[in-house]
Amino acid sequence: VIGKNVVVTAEIHPLIQKLSRAISLSEAEASLVADTPVYRRSFNRGESIVRQGDRPTNCFVVIDGLSCRDKIVVGDRRQISAINVPGDLPDLQGVFLDVLDHNITALARSEVAFFPHKAILELFAGAPRVAAVFWRELLIEAAIYREWLGNIACRGSLPRLASFICETSIRLKIAGVSDGYKLMLPLTQGELGELLGMSLVHVNRCVRALREEQLVVFAGREVLILDWQRLQARGEYDPSYLQLSKKDKKGLPLA
Amino acid sequence: VIGKNVVVTAEIHPLIQKLSRAISLSEAEASLVADTPVYRRSFNRGESIVRQGDRPTNCFVVIDGLSCRDKIVVGDRRQISAINVPGDLPDLQGVFLDVLDHNITALARSEVAFFPHKAILELFAGAPRVAAVFWRELLIEAAIYREWLGNIACRGSLPRLASFICETSIRLKIAGVSDGYKLMLPLTQGELGELLGMSLVHVNRCVRALREEQLVVFAGREVLILDWQRLQARGEYDPSYLQLSKKDKKGLPLA
DNA sequence: CGTGTTATTGACCAACATCAAACTTAGTGG
DNA sequence: CCACTAAGTTTGATGTTGGTCAATAACACG
């Protein structure tokens, strides 16, 4: 739990850190945020941060690492519906809805900061600009789902994979954990398949195709983008749904 | 524009009507809501209510009719990513994000009530319980997207169509415009295809299959569910993501 | 060094897309 | 009321994408 004196604290309050990226907080807002108690916890790859059926009383912000939303769909098939990057607040759902309909699972060792629902409700009531940041993020999350729907429904497998890499590159770069070309993405090809709605075998074929086209190299838990523009073209990727600011776009050769 | 005296007004303020279904408004809340000015407008089938690229200054609540979110994905393919039913507030996006990344198009003659962004922001600041209603709805919308992702990615075409009918039946029933068995759904099979991510021809075959299995009849602009339970089974449909209350479930033989 | 996980490749097959054409329905104007 | 048109539906034939099965190779970890 962090005290009032934010600036000189060794550990910056994770919510302040997160919000400062989006807006510049006033003194009053900052101290309001700084008052919300947090406790940090780490999760290893494969661990559930929250589970389907849970009725959480806490919410959390991702400080570091990578996680995903997932759900068992039919018999044994798992669907991954979203990737969470540092700065995300993936469990707003728990604040407003009773019971969780999916899991959030760590894909890499992740550090998260929990804080009580009550705190975030008070924050929303007391600092509308902070609430607006979260409205925006939730709306962008919805826009990402729509984009994925379009990808899975309309595009072939290779553009689908290419689009995913483009999107994730941008999101990791905004989150400050990638330069946009070298991505730390510890996903197995099986997980990529659960994400993109295709079989493990076919993911492999697409990965190979992207390598042969000199667009992307998959190296263990890293992904290297060799040619951003051609990759974007291959994925017919238009990032407008991400609502990027000019600052966000810097450093990526977006068409 | 509606005055303060809500109860005796001939036309009930559409937002009050909408919110009363979710929570019981206090006097103070009701009068706050009643103060937000609205103007109504009708749209014919095929008309855009808002368009990709717009920077709207107004938001709207659907009073009656049916509409969808849609977007041109690749060359000429349109993807429909969501259906809006009466009571929905589909353009919260415009309040918090600059530019719209998709259209909202009327699928049947629709009546909507517009009100300025400023009004809804004031409402959120002044009535947190009202804000909570909209948080919930946006989160459920996101849950619906996730469910559709799972459907398109994991399930065959017939369960996909069956699931869509189950979901829409429930949503129309909650909206108060269907008994859950007879749905007013003026979608062409082409539109169903854009919605489910399959070709018009294949939609037709699935429609026929559902008819032959005596589960659903498509009659012009109406859909009749003959056997809810078997339809649900055929679609492997689990509505938990809709966060239904007990009241909502009444009248539908959900497993 | 062995054991389990992940990646890679090939062969085969099914679901669904595409193409093409006939048929039905609804709307329009004479 | 009928003829005409446009939109939507239905059906068949054919082709392709990507799934499934199966086996091997490369790693990773104790």
Image: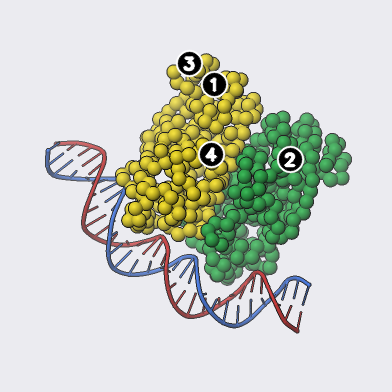
Chain colours: A green, B yellow, C red, D blue
Labelled pair 1, 4 in contact (Cβ < 8 Å)? no
Q: On the image, numbered disc 2 is attached to which residue?
A: A116
Q: Nearer the viewer, residue A255 or B229?
A: B229
Amino acid at pointer 2: Pro
Q: Is residue A235 left or right of residue A96?
A: left
Q: On the image, numbered disc 1 is attached to which residue?
A: B34
Q: On the image, numbered disc 4 is attached to which residue?
A: B246
Query: Residue B240's spot in the image, x, y percent?
Result: 55, 47
Q: Are marks 2 and 1 on the same chain?
A: no
In the picture, residue B35 is in which quadrant?
Answer: top right
Q: Is residue B103 left or right of residue B92?
A: left
Amino acid at pointer 4: Lys
Q: On the image, numbered disc 3 is attached to which residue?
A: B8
Q: Chain of mark 1?
A: B
Residue name at image x 72 percent, y 32 percent = A122
Report if residue B84 is visible in the image. no
Q: Nearer the viewer, residue B32 or A76?
A: A76
Marks 1 and 3, how far apart at CA: 12 Å
- Judge depth for marks 4 and 2 and give the one in front: 4
Q: Are marks 1 and 4 on the same chain?
A: yes
Q: Which mark sits nearer the N-terminus, 1 or 3? A: 3
Badge 3: how crowded within 10 Å, few (<14), some, or many (20+)? few
Query: Residue A207's spot in the image, x, y percent?
Result: 58, 67
Badge 2: how crowded within 10 Å, few (<14), some, or many (20+)? some
Residue name at image x 79 percent, y 40 percent = A37
Residue name at image x 78 percent, y 43 percent = A38
Marks 4 and 2, how far apart at CA: 27 Å
